[in-house]
Every structure is written in C-alpha cells, then in structure tokens.
Amino acid sequence: MSRRGGIPLTSCSLGLCATVALSLLTAPGARAEDAPAVAASPAPSPSSPSAPSSSPLALPAPAEAPSVDRPRLSLALGMGVSFDDTGFSPRRTAAVPSFFALGGFGDGFVGIDFGLFASTATGRFRNPDAPVDRLGLDAMLVLRPVAHGVGADDKRWVLRVLRAAALEVGAGYERDGHGASADQRFGFRLGGRLEFPLTAASDPSQLRLRLAARHLSAGTKATGAADTPVRDTVAELYAALAVVF
C-alpha cells in the first residue's frame, strides 16, 4: 500500500468510486429511466356502452304512444237558392234565397253528413204571392264512387275533383209555413256534389269550393192559417266553402 501526502492510495480510490456511483444514481435522467413505465388508462367515454350512467336513478325514455287514425272531418257554409212554386200566384217557380250549413265524418268511399237548410221568402214577394219559409234538417250517407279507383296516388287537380265527387242519400225534415203558422214534413233526400280543391294536395287540411244540387221528396201537405198546399221544391242549389281536416 503506497502513500501520497500521508493518505493511503487504496482509501482514496474507494472514496472516489463511491462518489461517482452516488452521482449517477441521484441524477434526474437516471431516475426517469429507472422508474417503471405505467400506461395511463384512458378516461371512459360518455358514449361508451360500458360507461356508468351519470345518474344511478335515470329512467329509460317512455315509448311513443301508437297513433290512432280517425276519419277526416268536414265543415261547409254556403249560400244558394231554392226553386219553389208553393204560394205563388199565378203559379210559377221562383228562386228563393237560402242558407246551407253542413258537417260530416269521412272523406273516403263512404261518409256521413248532417245538414241545415233555411229559405227566407217572407217579405221578398208582393201580394198575391204567399210563398212559405222552409227550415230543414238532413242526415245523409255520402257516397264517393271513385274515391279510391282513379289514380289514388295521382295528385293532379282534375283527378282530385273526380275522387271527391259524391252522391248524397238520406232522410230529411222540414218545417214549412208563414212565421209561427207552420207544419212539419218528413221525406227522402237525394243530391250530388262536386268539390274543387283550393289548396295543395300535400296540405294536411284541405279547402274546397263545393257546388251541390239536392231535392227533398216529401209529398204535398196543407199547412198554415190559409191552408196553403206546400209542395216539394223543384231543386236546391248552393255554393259553399268546405274545410276538410
């Protein structure tokens, strides 16, 4: 063992080696390299099926209620004339202004309509004419022969008119007379109609112009203070705006 300056050479060498080893172990790069790599686990995605619900009390969305189909409804209001020969002297047929209101169910091959009819003759004609005022109620089957037979999916305007063409068959009631002096009649109602669309075929509600003719067959019946023989009108014609929804 040699000595330099009084310090043993072996002890100096050992101390130097220990200092170098301690420096290598405590360096930042060495600690990072020696540390075991830990893979970061990805955060669960909110849309992942395995992700837990944000609320443990969350309920499933309610199922949609099944749709219920209903027959289409219609309302119509219009004005027209009643061609009447009751109470006119000399006997003739005259046009009496009339009011019409109708409502119904169904816009297919078969529908049901209820109607109100009123004619106002009092005060419109001079003596010796004595026509009667008429108030009528109707219940009718509405039959559309080609509702589903002529291009059911064709939206052309002419075909829409053909599919809406209808025949009216039903029963009618009339109260006929002069003011409070009146009598009642029941009879058979027959008529026909054409409807001209005024809105696009894609619209959920339809506006139509209705032109119709009809007749009540109830026979002749004497009524009123003057015992006037009330006869059937020749025909009733009207134009109305109809809404189908």
Image: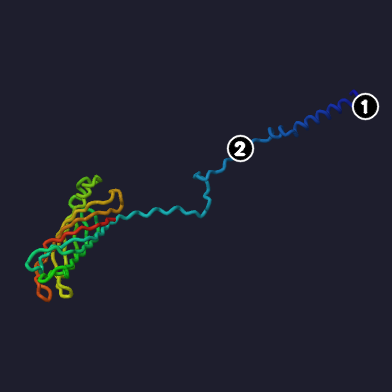
Instruction: Give residue 6's mark.
Output: 1
Please give left or right for residue 164 compared with residue 26 in the image. left
* Residue position marked by numbered label 2 in the rendering: 39
Callout 1 secondary element:
loop
Task: Tell me, yes or no, if residue 71 can be seen here.
Answer: no
Neighbour tally class for label 2: few under 14, some 14-19, many 20 plus, Cα within 10 Å: few
N-term mark: 1 or 2: 1
Residue 130 at x, y = what percent? 12, 71
Which residue is located at x 22 percent, y 52 percent? Answer: 196
Secondary element under disc 2, as helix, strand or loop, is loop
Q: For the N terminus, which image quadrant? A: top right
Q: Callout 1 environment at 10 Å: few (<14), some (14 to 19), or many (20+)?
A: few
**Nearer the observer, 194 or 41:** 194
Rendered view: 85 above or below 55: below
What residue is rendered at 22% in x and 45% in y? 151
- Name the image quarter holding residue 133: bottom left
Residue 121 percent across, percent down from the top left = 16, 68
Can the viewer see residue 20? Answer: yes
**Which of 160 and 132 lies nearest the eye of the viewer?**
132
Q: Say if 201 sits above or below 191 in the image.
A: above
Q: Image check: 169 left or right of 58?
A: left
Q: Amino acid at mark 2?
A: Ala
Residue at coordinates 52% horizontally, 50% vertically from top-left?
53
**Residue at the farthest right position:** 6
Residue at x-position 19% and y-position 66%: 118
The quarter holding residue 119 reads bottom left
Indicate the amino acid at tag 1.
Gly
Residue 160 lies, with reference to residue 128, above or below; the image says above
Q: Tell me where residue 194 appears, x and y as whole percent.
A: 19, 53
Looking at the image, which residue sits at the far front? 126
Whole-percent x and y of residue 31?
A: 71, 34
